[in-house]
Image (cartoon, helix red, strand yellow):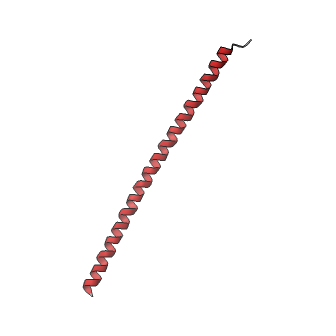
Amino acid sequence: MEDNGAVAKETIEGTVGYIGDDISLLTSAMNNFSSQVSEQVSMLGAIQSNVTGSIAMISCYSIGRVIAA
């Protein structure tokens, strides 16, 4: 006759182990996601500063042309 208490304990320990593994996988996935988001945000910042620089260059060029004319 199997000891139901021991079987139940083993099952619970196994389940808790699986849940722990799932939580650690989920945590690492969230960390990866947040680092990807921060990379995207910094890329957007770089793109924005490039666009701002380009607009400033075009404005200076246009003003120079107007003054020259």
Q: Quadrant of residue 25?
A: top right
Residue at image point 49% right, 45% down = 32
Residue at image point 52% right, 42% down = 29
Q: Which image quadrant: the C terminus?
A: bottom left
**Which residue ends up furthest to the top in the rendered image?**
1
- Is residue 2 shown above or below 15? above
- Is residue 13 shown above or below 5? below
Q: Which image quadrant: the N terminus?
A: top right
**Which residue ends up furthest to the left in the rendered image?**
67
- Is residue 16 shown above or below 48? above
Q: Quadrant of residue 8?
A: top right
Q: Is residue 68 left or right of residue 15?
A: left
Residue 33, image x and y in percent? Answer: 49, 46
Residue at image point 27% right, 80% down = 64
Q: Quadrant of residue 40?
A: bottom left
Q: Is residue 69 left or right of residue 45?
A: left
Numbered circles on residues, count: 0
Residue 63, image x and y in percent? Answer: 28, 79
**Residue nearer the viewer, 64 or 19:** 19
**Which residue ends up furthest to the bottom in the rendered image?**
69
**Residue nearer the viewer, 60 or 12:** 12
**Which residue ends up furthest to the right in the rendered image?**
1
Residue 51, image x and y in percent? Answer: 38, 67
Residue at image point 69% right, 13% down = 3
Q: Is residue 4 left or right of residue 55?
A: right
- Is residue 65 shown above or below 3? below
Residue 55, image x and y in percent? Answer: 34, 71
